[in-house]
Each structure stands twice: as C-alpha cells, then as structure tokens.
Image (cartoon, rainbow, N blue to C red):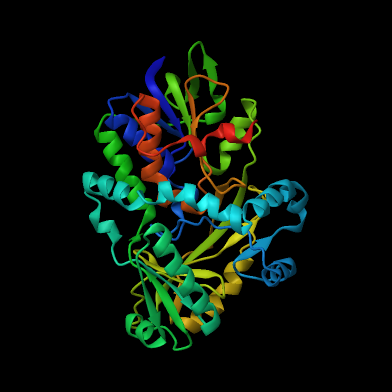
Amino acid sequence: MARKDIVVLGAGIIGICVALHLQKRGRAVALLERRGAAEETSFGNAGLIQREGVYPYGFPHDFGALARYALNRTIDAHYHLSALPTLAPFLWQYWHHSRPARHAAVARVYAKLIEHCVSEHDALIAECGAQDLVRRGGWLKVFRTARERDRRFREAERWKSEFGIEHRLLDAHALQEAEPYLAPVLAGAVHWTEPVRVEDPHALAEAYLKRFSELGGEFVQGNAATLEADGTGWKLRTAKGPLAAGGAVVALGPWADVLTRALGYHLPLAVKRGYHMHYRAAGEAQLNHPILDVERGYFMGPMHRGIRLTTGAEFALRDAPRTPVQLGRAEPIARELFPLAERLDNEPWMGARPCTPDMLPVIGPAPRHANLWFAFGHAHHGLTLAAVTGRLMAEMVTGETPFVDPAPYAAARFGR
C-alpha cells in the first residue's frame, strides 16, 4: 500500500493550491481527483482575482429586486421551481446573513482573506513562471443609468475608506475612451484597478499543478467517497491501488457534502450554478477590460479562448439537467453592447459554485475527526481565494502560526 503524509481530495484550484503549499513545506502529498485537474467548477469562471471583492455576493433585500427574481426572468438569477423546497432552508439563512448590518459584519471578516488574494497568487505565479497567463489593469463595473452609477460611486468611495480598495470613477466620456468598442449607451463605470485578470484559469491551475509535481507531489485518480478512517490516519482506493495517509484535506467544492455527510457532518451547503460561452470579437473590435453590466446582470471578459460571457447564479440542485436560459437572455443584450461574432464553443459550459449561507468559506479542522481538514465553500471566489486558502490550510496542518486568523471560517461555527 502506498503511503503519504497527507492526501488532498479534489483537484480544483483550491485543492491544487492546498496540495502545492503542503508539498512546499516538505510534506509527501497525494492530490486525488476523479477526472483531470481543474476540469469541473475551476474550469469556468470570470477569470478574476478580485482584490475588491470584500463584500461576498449577498441575497438582495430591496423589494424591486425580489419582485424581479420572483418572475424568474432575469439574467443574474434563475431558479428551478422544483428545487425550492430543498433549497428553502439554505435560502432563508442566506437571506438572513445578507441583511445590511450582518452583511457588513461578514465583509469585515471576509476582507481578511481578500486583502491577500493578489499577493498570494503573485507569489505562486512567479514561482511557476506563469506570468503570461495574467494581465494587470483591473476590471470595469459599468452602469446604464446615472442613478445606479452615482449609488455605486458612493459605495466605491466607502469601500476605499473602510478597506483601502483602490479604484477610478469614470464618467461616460472616460469610459468611452477606455473601451471605444462599447456602444455609447453607458453612464459611467467604476474601474477596480487592483484585481488581476487570468486569461486562462484552467491553464493557471495546470501551471500550479506542474509545480506541485516538480516538487515531488503525486496526482492520482480515484474516488474520494472511498475514504475511510485507518487507525490514526486515512485510507482510500485509487487507480494505482490502495493509498494510506496520515491526514486528509477535503477540497471537493460542490461535491464536498457527499463526503462530509457520509462522515456524519450536516453542514448547510448548497450550490449556485453558472454558465459561460466564448465568442469571437467581430472585425477589429477589442475588449480591453472585463466588464460587469450591473443593471443587466452578466459579465464579459477577454480570454485566450475569446470573449467569455458568463451568467449570474442559477439556484438548482447540483446534478439537475442544464438549463442555460440565462445565457440565452444575456447574449442578445451583450451583442448590443459589444460586437460579438459567432460562438466558439459547441455548447454552453456549466459549473456549480459551492456556497455556505453566511457567505464565508469553510477552512479548518473537521470538528469530530483527527487529521481531517476542510477547504471548500468559496462560492464566487474560488479562484480569488485559492492561493490564500492553500497557504492558510498548509500552515494549520503543519502547526505554523496562520497568517490569517482562521477561527471565523471553522466548520464548528455551524454546530453540526
């Protein structure tokens, strides 16, 4: 039987970063995945390392937004009616934690992770020689009405005061200069200047994985559901045969609850599904920055593959059939704003973002098992917080002093 110091379950961007940081600290690490690395949720995202993302995405509380969502016709949110009875307890807690005072308290805790997201990725990017996969210059949150623009301008100024988030405020003329191929229908934009854009998130994950392997880490295929206690450690089956490890880290993203429930934990986890499609830019058109069309609820960003159009959240059961209706609603609106040519993918990609109702990830030891650790529930910020989570988890596992206080992210906060 092969033996390792620790096995990391799940080779999405979170699991890869955890495994890499553990291997860098001299541990013998196996990274286990049922498929190839970063081929699930980590494959498709907006490609942003969001230094500005101190407020995790909350559930709206204003009546107008709730009324629009109830009609189930928006781009930024869609739900499966059949899933609502199952999702209701999660949604109720999510709504509760999204109340303004509570959301602000969550942001103060969340910001402790977010503030390190660019610097921690930069360290790994430099180590891996992956600088060609990232671009500086931030991204744009664009507005169609003066009312929304002015409200968001005030919000940006408040975030600057509270969290030190750097930005530029662009009026319609400045925005047109920054993005000359956008239709002149916008009232302005907030330019978040500190975030880093990743032009191929899958390739970045593979670069991190390559460095893990160069340091002696082993990537193996297997089923995490075969994990079982083995004395003071753990064992499971892999394509290469049985594997034993002194410790295990669960980094299974939207599938984390499959294993945690089998181990007796009942954490309040759910998923927000999302879709993307790539397009060729028509003619000589260029999109210089990723943009979020706030009042329409979709995102466009330049990628190596083409212009990636991504949707908001779909509230559905994780394994329910795909329903890319949000993408269908977004595409004609996006075409009016920017000259998109033909689709470049055979079909829309779909992924599932693993979420907790309090919008904080689960990072830390399992409450009732020795040598078992959790690293999941990062919602919209899996890529953003991957390098931070990798370092924080490795420091906890190896007994170092954590560079961020991990207490607020512990699974024990749910009491189950």
Please report the residue visible at 47 percent of the width from the left and 84 percent of the height from the top. 187
Measuring from the top left, give residue 228's x and y in whole percent. Answer: 55, 20
Q: Nearer the viewer, residue 149 or 135?
A: 149
Where 282 falls versus 362 (above or below)? below
One can see residue 80 in this view: yes
Where 349 falls versus 17 (above or below)? below
Quick one: quadrant of the C terminus? Answer: top right
Please report the residue visible at 52 percent of the width from the left and 72 percent of the height from the top. 294
Q: Quadrant of residue 166?
A: bottom left
Measuring from the top left, give residue 375's x and y in whole percent. Answer: 48, 37
Measuring from the top left, give residue 376's x and y in whole percent. Answer: 51, 40
In this picture, residue 292 sits left or right of residue 103? left
Q: Nearer the viewer, residue 180 or 324?
A: 180
Q: Nearer the viewer, residue 312 or 10?
A: 312
Where 77 falls versus 315 (above or below)? below
Q: Residue furthest front?
A: 161
Q: Residue furthest top?
A: 231
One can see residue 145 in this view: no
Please report the residue visible at 37 percent of the width from the left and 62 percent of the height from the top. 165
Q: Nearer the viewer, residue 403 or 240?
A: 403
Measuring from the top left, give residue 322's x and y in whole percent. Answer: 63, 57
